[in-house]
Image: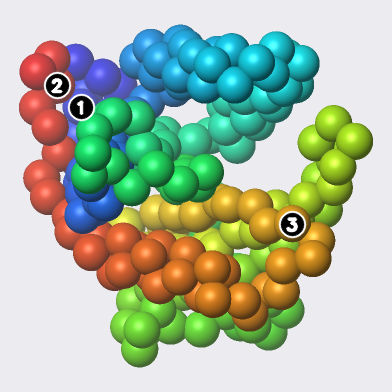
């Protein structure tokens, strides 16, 4: 029994997403890091690129460290090999945003609309959507790390907590932000975020 159970606080509901073929949900401590590292090593050595493996291993380690620091509770990516798997270099991270004690997230929502241009996802005012970009060095190259962020209030939280989904992918500097490939990524991630459903929390101990 958790402290929340002992003091009578109802746990937040669980959430589900409809994922592309070959994608799965993972926690940070479920062994998925080792699986991803093994897949990366196999691809790099099959292509005779040991130096690329060393660089990408360091990048993967940093990614997991960043996820832990950001309080990521789950991530979604292509980890199930198969002929139908949508194998693209992208992922979705999920975390919970908490309001300051005694407040709700309304001020944050207003600032995201004002400063980040956040808009309802596909007309659904229950989910805010905005995009961010930053340049990242990978070896001797510079790429643009592009994120699409979705924020939805947790049911029953009185707007004090929100589920935040961050879909991350990269593009070369010479690829336009409005290119067909970028728009295809946007369409995919918008559809995944729009598929969000809530359900009763899993029983403790199961």
Which quadrant of the rendered structure holds the C terminus?
top left
Pointer 1: residues within 10 angstroms few (<14), some, or many (20+)? few
Q: Is residue 126 above or below residue 162?
A: below
Quadrant, the N terminus: top left
Most extreme residue toward the right is 140
Mark 3: secondary structure: strand
Mark-to-mark CA distance, 3 and 1: 48 Å
Q: Which of 47/36 is in front?
A: 47
Q: Tell which tag, 3 or 1, sits nearer the viewer.
A: 3
Inter-mark Cα distance, 1 to 2 = 10 Å
Q: Going from the N terminus, do you reach mark 3 or mark 1 first? A: 1
Picture coordinates of residue 191, whole percent (x, y)? 31, 68
Depicted 23 relative to depicted 123: above or below: above
Residue at the spot of label 3 = 172
Residue 117: quadrant of the picture? bottom right
Pointer 1 with pointer 2, Cβ within 8 A: yes
**Residue 143 horizontal/vertical position (percent):** 78, 51
Crowding at dot 3, Cα within 10 Å, few <14 / some 14-19 / many 20+, comes out as: few
- Residue, disc 1: 5
Mark positioned earlier in the residue sequence (3 or 2):
3
Quarter of the image where one finds residue 107: bottom right
Residue at 26% over, 19% down: 2
Instruction: Please state the horizontal and vertical placement of residue 133, each as a whole percent of the image.
Output: 73, 62
Q: Residue at x 40, y 54 (%)?
A: 163
**Disc sitting over residue 204 in the figure:** 2
- Dividing the picture into quadrants, the one containing residue 8 is top left
Q: How many marks?
A: 3
Residue 125 falls left or right of residue 104: left
Query: Residue at left 24%, top 33%?
Result: 82
* Mark identifier at residue 94: none
| Closer-to-camera residue (45/32) | 45
Circle 3 or circle 2, nearest the eye: 3
């Amino acid at each position: 029994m958790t402290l929340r159970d002992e003091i009578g606080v109802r746990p937040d509901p669980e959430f589900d997403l409809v994922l592309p073929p070959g994608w799965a949900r993972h926690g940070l401590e479920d062994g998925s890091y080792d699986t991803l590292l093994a897949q990366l090593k196999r691809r790099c050595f099959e292509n005779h690129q040991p130096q690329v493996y060393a660089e990408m291993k360091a990048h993967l380690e940093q990614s997991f460290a960043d996820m832990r620091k950001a309080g990521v509770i789950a991530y979604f990516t292509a980890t199930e090999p198969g002929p139908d798997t949508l194998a693209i270099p992208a992922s979705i991270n999920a975390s919970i945003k908490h309001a300051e004690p005694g407040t709700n997230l309304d001020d944050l929502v207003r600032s995201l609309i004002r400063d980040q241009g956040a808009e309802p996802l596909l007309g659904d005012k229950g989910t805010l959507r905005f995009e961010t970009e930053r340049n990242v060095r990978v070896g001797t190259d510079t790429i643009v790390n592009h994120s699409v962020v979705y924020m939805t209030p947790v049911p029953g939280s009185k707007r004090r907590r929100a589920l935040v989904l961050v879909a991350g992918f990269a593009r070369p500097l010479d690829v336009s932000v409005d290119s067909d490939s970028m728009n295809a990524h946007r369409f995919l991630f918008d559809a995944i975020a729009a598929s969000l459903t809530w359900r009763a929390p899993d029983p403790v101990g199961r």
